[in-house]
Amino acid sequence: MPILIQNQQNKVNVNLSRTRQAFQKILELLDIEDKEVSILIVDDEDIRKINRDYLGRDRPTNVISFSMSEGEFGDVNPSILGDIIISAETAKKDAENHSIPFEDEIDFLLIHGLLHLLGYDHETTDSDAEIMKAKEKELFFSLKKYFID
């Protein structure tokens, strides 16, 4: 299935070819290469608007996911997982704060967003958060060969 990637910002250079390859590898690690996901790269202003309008949080964030498998019509096309929206600006700041390469931060956010599309949740209970964090660490290590906090 296709991985649709669009960069709608020009504040941070994002290598879309590299991002596509990394995301394909993540899908392979999860054995879900037959699923469709769209990835949108935006700036802080755009992700703040999305966060405000859809989640009621009037601030920028690093990643937001919108699952196509939730809700009344969630079973219409099970091969489409949904959308992952990443703020390149916030990702760059997070990478600097964690002392990791920007590309690795993008990979982590792709993992995080994809896990949300697959039903993982870190906001409901502490045990759910622990499960999701463990899966993120496992996938990130499989992809990058080092652990991330």
Image (cartoon, helix red, strand yellow):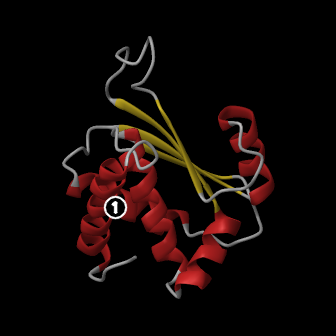
Q: In this figure, which residue is indicated by the disc labeled 1?
A: 133
Identify the image quadrant of the N terminus: top left
Q: Tally the numbered discs.
A: 1
Farthest bottom residue?
A: 99
Vertical comparison of 38 with 102: above or below: above
Vertical comparison of 65 with 148: above or below: above
Q: Residues within 10 Å of mark 1 (few under 14, many from 20)?
A: some
Farthest right residue?
A: 45
Q: Residue 20 at x, y = what percent?
A: 44, 59
Q: Residue 102 at x, y = what percent?
A: 55, 78
Q: Residue 36 at x, y = what percent?
A: 38, 37
Query: Which element type, helix, strand or loop, lies under badge 1?
Result: helix
**Residue found at x 42% / y 24%:** 70
Residue 110 horizontal side relative to residue 75, left or right:
right
Farthest top residue?
A: 72
Residue 55 horizontal side relative to residue 102, left or right:
right
**Residue found at x 74% / y 34%:** 53
